[in-house]
Image (cartoon, helix red, strand yellow):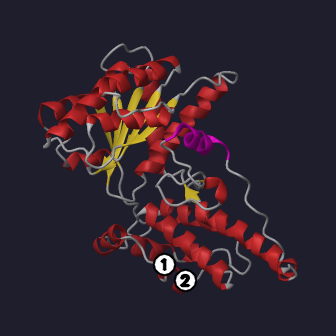
Amino acid sequence: MTARPTTTDPADPDGDEAAGDEAAGRHLTTLEGWRQFTTDPPPPPTLLPRQRHEGLGDLERTLYDEARLDHHARLRVVATSTVRHAVTCGRRLVLMNRHAVSARRGLILSGPAGTGKTIAITQLGRAHELLDQARHPSRADRIPVVYITVPPAATPRMIAAEFARFLGLPVTRSANITDITEAVVGVCTDTRTGLVLVDELHNISLTSRSGAEVADTLKYFSERIPATFVYAGIDIERSNLLSGTRGAQIAGRFTLLPTRPFPYGEEWTGLVATLEQHLLLHDHRPGTLVALDRHLHHRTGGMIGALSHQIRGAAIDAILTGTEKITKDGLDAIPLDHAAQTSARATPSGRRR
């Protein structure tokens, strides 16, 4: 079997509600939230011996279980082949764009929902942020990464405001888009922003006037900010974003990196095994999930987001119900998203290679 990927438990990059009071109000689309995401995660709680666990008082048991619930709620698979490829491609583009004065090239991650696009671009951003911090340890005034999402029915001013919100710049009702844009460009230039991540790109439609203007606004930002732009969205290659004159400009500057459901094979088994290694359950027998890897693949359709959701949900149920183990029935009791269920019906179980 190939080397198994690792896990981490950062603030949820897919937008799920984070557990715990400390995570309240934390968003990757703010500078504070992003910096919290890039810091090392807190260590997981220690799994107590069964006898000591049974001897805990009510308050101690509640606090102990809450710590384990929080651990499982935030567990994330990150080091997949998709993430590694995105980080490699993104790092290469950043280096190639370092001395470019125009026509900087970028990256688009495109694929079905639940295939790990957001995880991939945020891990690319995290790697870039940590590298910049290592190179400039005493420079707290740098903002090497900006992360925004495209709102539904976005307008150019809304996009500019998303940039400003991440940077903590005030946006008044009287401020026009030119004022906001100039402020954003000035701050990004002064703070040496080198990577701009734009998620939910599928919310832009070039068939509408506002959508075309949003695309032009992003292009203008990419020309004014000396940074590498990385986009992520659902099935971009099948949308109109790469067609027509505007689409041709995007297609001519951006490399398209597809994300897909994982086939059943060694990497899938490794992902399941890694998640199982991070379970903190008293009665769970190691190897149980690996033995169910084909069933997990069939039920999730190979969607990494659905796999994480199913295992984390079953672990939380195991603590809440006191069973302290994950079983096939426990996994099947976790309802999955419609996209994963649809993919599961369309995807054959396959054979181990």
Give above or below for 263 relative to 129: below
Q: Main secondary structure of the magenta part?
A: helix
Q: Are marks 1 and 2 in contact (CB under 8 Å)?
A: yes
Residue position marked by numbered label 1 in the rendering: 334
Q: Amino acid at mark 2?
A: Gly
| Residue lying at 28% horizontally and 43% vertically, measured from the top left | 154
In depth, the one of 350 and 262 nearer the eye is 262
Residue 212: which quarter of the image?
top left
**Label 1 SS:** loop
Q: Residues within 10 Å of mark 2 (few under 14, many from 20)?
A: some
In depth, the one of 331 and 285 nearer the eye is 331
| Residue lying at 25% horizontally and 35% vertically, measured from the top left | 214
Does residue 207 show up magenta in the picture?
Answer: no
- Residue 272: x and y in percent read 55, 66
Q: Is residue 65 left or right of residue 94?
A: right
| Residue lying at 35% horizontally and 58% vertically, measured from the top left | 113
Report the Cα–Cα distance between label 1 and label 2. 7 Å
For the record, the magenta segment spans 30-40
| Residue lying at 52% horizontally and 79% vertically, measured from the top left | 331
- Residue 1: x and y in percent read 56, 60
In depth, the one of 211 and 246 nearer the eye is 211
Residue position marked by numbered label 2 in the rendering: 330
- Residue 166 visible within the image: yes
Q: Amino acid at mark 1?
A: Ile
- Residue 80: x and y in percent read 50, 52
- Residue 242 visible within the image: no
- Residue 89: x and y in percent read 43, 35
Give above or below for 46 relative to 137: below
Residue 186: which quarter of the image?
top left
